[in-house]
Image: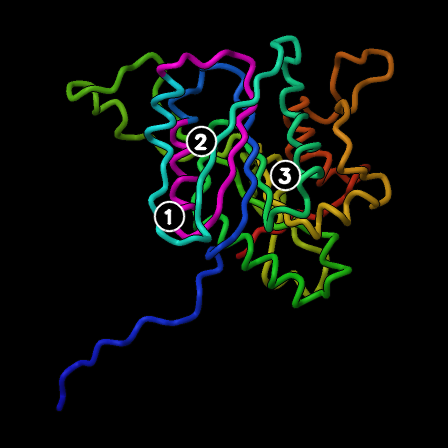
Amino acid sequence: DDGIEASSSSSTPSILDGLRVLVAIASYDFMQLSHLEEVLDGFQDLCYAGSKVDIVVYTTVMYPVALIDMFNDRMRCNNPSPNAGLTMTLMLKPSRVRLHLVDFHRELFYDRIEQYDVFIYTEDDIRISPKTVAAYLHETQRVESIVGPKHATDFNVGIVRYEYDFPENVVITDKTRHASVNVTRVYWEHLGRPIFEKTVDKVEDEALAPYYISMHKPHQGMYLVTPFLLKAWKDRPNCRFNEARNRPSHPSNPSQPTEGTQRVWMSSQMMYGGRHCAVKQLLPV
């Protein structure tokens, strides 16, 4: 018989099956509500991929009952697996916290460090898909297999943040959709040329260098992390990753940051900054 025989599906479980995920989102007000809806859709997809996902949204505005009802209706996950699930909690903070809204997730992560397999912090306009989470776990395991568990705490697998350069002050309709014909991804923090001198850095570890690069400016606006790394960074010299604190500033002018704003500090610079945790960002190639 020369017919083509269909291959049977693999019995190997997905890396996302039964994964316990805690997500913290900083969403100050309703200015980016449309983006927040997309972000939440990504985590709903993660539940349908087999994970148990608990979402905590930090905000400074009261959500109307109608909006809460909409989220209750939309944020359902009908995955029949007993290991999958989805919850969403709103945490209201006073508006005076301003940019320090990004601080609160850190205590949450360490308080619940034994309850989850992966922790995700993100701003409210960065969509994270199941593919992103699966890739993070795969590459994190790969790094540990290459350099060993102890040395693996010197690294964290990251992302490259991009946006789309949609035209300003244009409402996209059937008659104006031509305005988006040249829209493309823009990497605002990675515009240096030539790329491999001004934007991308080589990983100095010889064992990892063939497989990974890092960005010269590692700001991500989010991060993923495992409990193993959280525990290691708590006691890492100059790190104290468990402590939310102010971004570095000029001694003579505390209002002037020296290494980015509070949001940059809490999402990226504390982790990757050479004078702080000095963890090396890894991007698979």
In the image, farthest residue toward the front? 82
Using the rendered view, name the quadrant where residue 263 is placed. Answer: top right
> Residue 218 — which label?
3
Residue hosting label 2? 163
Q: Residue at x 63, y 46 (%)?
A: 115
Q: Residue at x 45, y 33 (%)?
A: 186
Q: Amino acid at mark 2?
A: Glu
Q: Using a 10 Å C-alpha cutoff, classify the residue at mark 1 as few (fewer than 14 neighbours), some (14 to 19) or many (20 or more).
A: many
Q: Residue at x 69, y 29 (%)?
A: 265
Q: Is residue 48 magenta?
A: yes
Residue hosting label 1? 48
Return the disc, 3 or 1, that comes first in the chain's sequence: 1
Q: Amino acid at mark 3?
A: Pro
Above or below — where is 89 with respect to 210? above
Residue 250 lies left or right of residue 212; in this view the side is right
Q: Residue 133 or 216: which is nearer the viewer?
A: 133
Return the disc, 2 or 3, that comes first in the chain's sequence: 2
Looking at the rendering, the stretch of residues picked out in magenta corresponds to 37-66
Q: CA distance from mark 3 to mark 1?
A: 31 Å
Instruction: Kindly state the secondary structure of the residue where label 1 is placed.
Output: helix
